[in-house]
Image: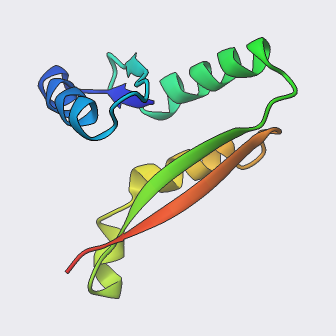
């Protein structure tokens, strides 16, 4: 699942997805107001209505910067998403660190 806030960026992402994630479907959620959490929560509500007993796993990539103070500049969206999903039943959030050099 990918939340679109810029159509050109989405086009490039879809090209990379088709190349590296062959056979895996990609759901693109449009966000006219540059909100990531709103469309994500709406989509999760839809999934939970369709299959209320199923567990949903959200995988969030998170940058691990070289210096501690650089963390203040990165991962703010991931932090908002984790906070929004913290009390949602049937939703698991997994963080995948990506180390910056």
Image spot of residue 37 (x, y percent): 50, 34
Q: Is residue 36 above or below residue 97?
A: above
Q: Residue at x 53, y 49 (%)?
A: 59
Tally of numbered discs: 0
Q: Quadrant of residue 76?
A: bottom left
Question: Quadrant where the N terminus lies?
Answer: top left
Image spot of residue 98 (x, y percent): 35, 68
Q: Residue furthest front?
A: 23
Res. 3 visible in picture = yes
- The reply, left or right, for residue 66 in relation to residue 30 is left
Q: Residue at x 48, y 52 (%)?
A: 60
How is the model colour-coded? rainbow
Q: Residue furthest bottom?
A: 67
- The reply, left or right, for residue 83 in relation to residue 34 is right
Q: Residue at x 70, y 48 (%)?
A: 92
Q: Quadrant of residue 47?
A: top right
Res. 35 visible in picture = no
Image spot of residue 41 (x, y percent): 60, 27
Image spot of residue 84 (x, y percent): 63, 43
Question: Quadrant where the C terminus lies?
Answer: bottom left
- The reply, left or right, for residue 42 in relation to residue 27 is right
């Amino acid at each position: 699942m990918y939340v679109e806030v810029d159509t050109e960026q989405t086009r490039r992402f879809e090209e990379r997805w088709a190349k590296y994630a062959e056979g895996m479907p990609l759901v693109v959620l449009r966000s006219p107001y540059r909100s990531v959490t709103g469309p994500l929560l709406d989509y999760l509500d839809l999934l939970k209505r369709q299959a209320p007993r199923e567990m949903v796993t959200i995988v969030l990539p998170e940058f691990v910067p070289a210096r501690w103070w650089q963390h203040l500049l990165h991962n703010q969206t991931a932090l908002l998403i984790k906070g929004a999903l913290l009390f949602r039943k049937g939703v698991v959030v997994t963080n995948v660190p990506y180390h910056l050099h």
